[in-house]
Image: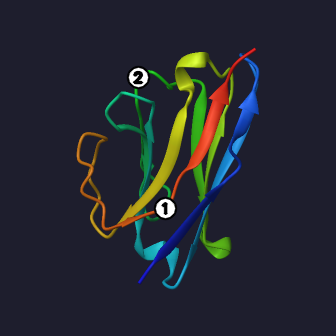
Amino acid sequence: QLQLVESGGGLVQPGGSLRLSCVASGLTLINFNIAWFRQAPGKDREGVSCISRSGGSTVYADSVKGRFTISRDNAKNTVYLQMNSLKPDDTAVYYCAADYAWKGGLTNQNYRYWGQGTQVTVSS
């Protein structure tokens, strides 16, 4: 069983930055493809970014391209989401998710393992 724990969320002003971390335990992270999703109040959960097991392939939602960067350190069993130039529309609970299968995009949310989420609030 893989456990995922997100951290790094908080309150930030528009234009600011945050780095989210997703730490895995129980199984080796290198065996999993990882995605970040987010859900704002009253909205459906949406894919933000995903990264392949080796880190060689990444996908970003159009809304975050050029502002967010996903990366992973398999030696530390950790995946990161660097978020720059944050906007109020980025306010949401952010979740990391893991699956053995590479989804190739962000519309498929059928991930086997999910974290509990971390709140990101962008407000002045």
Whether label 2 touches label 1, CB < 8 Å: no
**Quarter-wise, where is residue 21 in the image?**
bottom right
Whole-percent x, y for residue 10 in the image: 72, 39
Q: Residue at left 49%, top 61%? A: 115
Residue 107 visible in rendering:
yes
**Three-letter amino acid code at disc 1?**
Gly
Q: Residue at left 75%, top 27%? A: 12
**Three-letter amino acid code at disc 2?**
Asp
Calculate the distance from the C-alpha at mark 2 to the C-alpha at mark 1: 23 Å
Of residues 74 and 122, the one drawn nearer to the viewer in this rendering = 122
Q: Residue at left 30%, top 60%? A: 111
In the image, farthest residue toward the front: 42
* SS type, badge 1: loop
In this figure, which residue is indicated by the disc labeled 1? 115
In this figure, which residue is indicated by the disc labeled 2? 62
Say how the picture is coloured: rainbow
Of residues 113 and 43, the one drawn nearer to the viewer in this rendering = 43
Q: Is residue 114 left or right of residue 17?
A: left
Q: Residue at left 74%, top 32%? A: 11
Residue 17 visible in rendering:
no
Whole-percent x, y for residue 74 in the image: 59, 70
Q: Is residue 77 left or right of residue 107?
A: right
Up the image or down, 93 lies above or below 14; here it is: below
Whole-percent x, y for residue 62 in the image: 41, 23
Crowding at label 1, few (<14), some or many (≥20) Cα neighbours within 10 Å? many
**Quarter-wise, where is residue 85 in the image?**
top right
**Quarter-wise, where is residue 68 in the image?**
top right
Up the image or down, 43 lies above or below 78; here it is: above
Q: Which label sits in the foreground, 2 or 1?
A: 1
Up the image or down, 73 lies above or below 3; here it is: above
* SS type, badge 2: loop
Crowding at label 2, few (<14), some or many (≥20) Cα neighbours within 10 Å? few
